[in-house]
Every structure is written in C-alpha cells, then in structure tokens.
Image: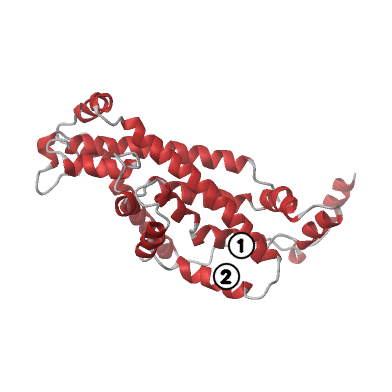
Amino acid sequence: MSINMSKKKIDGVPKKHRFKLKKRKPNRSRAGDFFLYLFLFLVAIIMVFPLVFAVSSALKPLEELFMFPPKIFARNPTLDNFADLFVTMGKSWVPFTRYFYNTLFITVVGTAGHLIIASMGAFVLAKYDFPGGKTFFRIVVVAIMFNGYVTMIPNYLILSKLHLIDTQWAVIIPAFSSPMGLFLMKQFMDGLPMSLVEAAKIDGATSGQILKNVTIPMVMPSITICTFLTLTNSFKLFDQNLALTNGEPSNMSELLALNIFRTFYGRTGWEGVGQAKAVVFFLLVAAIALTQNWLTRRKEVQQ
C-alpha cells in the first residue's frame, strides 16, 4: 500500500520539477587508466619473470644451462634434472630430508618466538605509558630501515660470546629480534578500543589473560601478516646460515637455501639438479605459506 502511494505521489509531480540522479564517474581520464594498468602489467611481468626463468632452467638439459646469451624458455625441455634429484636424495650421505627438517625446525621455532616476543612488546608499548616508551618505539622504527647485513657482524660477535656459533640457535635467535613484527602489531593494537581492556580488568582478568583472550584475537590480521613475512624470510635464509654456522657441525645446521647453492656451484655437472631443487623448494614454501595464511585468517575476528 505504501509503495503504491509513493508511486502516485511521484506520478503527480510535473516533469519540470523532476530530476534524474546522475551516476558519478571516476575523476580520471582514459589515458590515465591506460598508463596505470600498463605500469601494473609491467610490474607483474618483472615479478613473475624470475619464477618463470627458474622453472624453465630446471627443465633445460645441462648444455642449455650455459648457453650465452641465455634463453628464457627451454628448447628441449626434459625432466632429467628432477629424476636425478630424486635419485640422489636417497644416496647422499646427509639425506635431503635432513636439510628440509633443519629449515622447518628453524622456521617454526623462529616464527613462534618472534610472534610471542613481538606481541608482548607491542601490547606494552600500545596500552601502557612508561618513561622511555615513545623513545623505544622510535628506535624500533629506525631499526626497520636497516638491512640484516648491517647487524650481521654484531650478531656474530654476540653469538660467539654466547658460544652459539655453528649451532642452530645462531640462526634462530636473530629471527626473534626482527623489528617489523613489533611495529605492525603495535600499530594494530593502537586501534584496539581501550574499553575492552578496561572491561576485562573489571572482570578480574590479568594482563596475560587480556593479551591472550582479548588483544590477540582482535589483532589477528597483524599476526597473519607477521607470520607470513617471518615464515617466508626464515625459509629463504642464506647469508646468516653461511656466515654464522656454514652448515656445521657436519651439515646438521645447513638449510635448504645454502644446500641449493652448494649443489649448483659445488659440484660440476649438478647445476641442473640445483635448479630442480630450487623449484621443489619454491613449491614447498608456497604450499606451507598458503596453508599458514588460510589457518590464521580463519581465526580473525570480524569487526
């Protein structure tokens, strides 16, 4: 009934008093759209090219790997490199699974430790006022600008004093101190309503319970990002593994990235096997990273 009445009112209005709603158009030109999409397309090609070249190189026979100028795609693609890889995996005096276990162990422990330390530190910086808190956070922001190569020598000196050189902990402990996770979590926790924290305190919750049951579920998006970044960075560790442990003792701390490097450059005629290892390694990291992202996103709280 009300719909019919509204239609009658509209029909009774003269046409000169009626107006049409105009659709708003984006305030940009077609030329701007074209160059924007062209730029994004070129960036996508630049990002995908190394992966395409790596997969293509793994399919090349040995004589094609050293052609100059190098060809992007294999002329005579073959799976011999992958066949040789799986044959040598069982014959090596240190099994390939050992390198995978080293990488997985260091990645899991380093990621878990980093998330625990970063979440506790971010909670204190975001929700508590104490002398020097803002100065400390400024130091964290400045530390983000420094590459890991800058801190490699201090890390080596500290770990050597602790007698941790040539152990797995020489690679795990530096992962705990990454400033990026602390920065991201602190920014997310700043947006957490203080009323939730106060309500939890009134109900008798301790600081640890507030962090576990209130803060962490509300900042799961930041944990998802931090976990993904720490996970992928830990999997591709190479320089720290080479400088701090060099795979010692007896290759027991050698990670997959260092093992791939030694396979490609350490043995003549094994360059194709090294390329095959790199492709298999990429597939493993991609599968683990996507699984981690799916699991953590399931626990995010919809706000």
**In this picture, is 44 found above or below 285?**
below
Q: Position of residue 183 (x, y in %)?
A: 55, 63
Please give the name of the residue rendered at 30% of the width and 54% of the height, measured from the top-left corner: 243
Q: Is residue 275 left or right of residue 152?
A: left
Graded by Cα atoms within 10 Å as few (under 14), some (14 to 19) or many (20 or more), the crowding at tag 2 reads: some
Q: Is residue 68 left or right of residue 228?
A: left
Q: Nearer the viewer, residue 44 or 119?
A: 119
Q: Secondary structure at mark 1?
A: helix
Quadrant of residue 43 in the image? bottom left
Tell whether label 1 touches label 2 (CB within 8 Å).
Answer: yes
Residue identified by numbered label 2: 137
* Amino acid type of the residue tagged 1 in the rendering: Lys
Which quadrant would the N terminus be assigned to in this image?
Answer: top right
Q: CA distance from mark 2 to mark 1?
A: 9 Å
Quadrant of residue 186 in the image? bottom right
* Amino acid type of the residue tagged 2 in the rendering: Phe
**In this picture, is 218 found above or below 274?**
below
Residue identified by numbered label 1: 186
**In this picture, is 141 found above or below 277?**
below
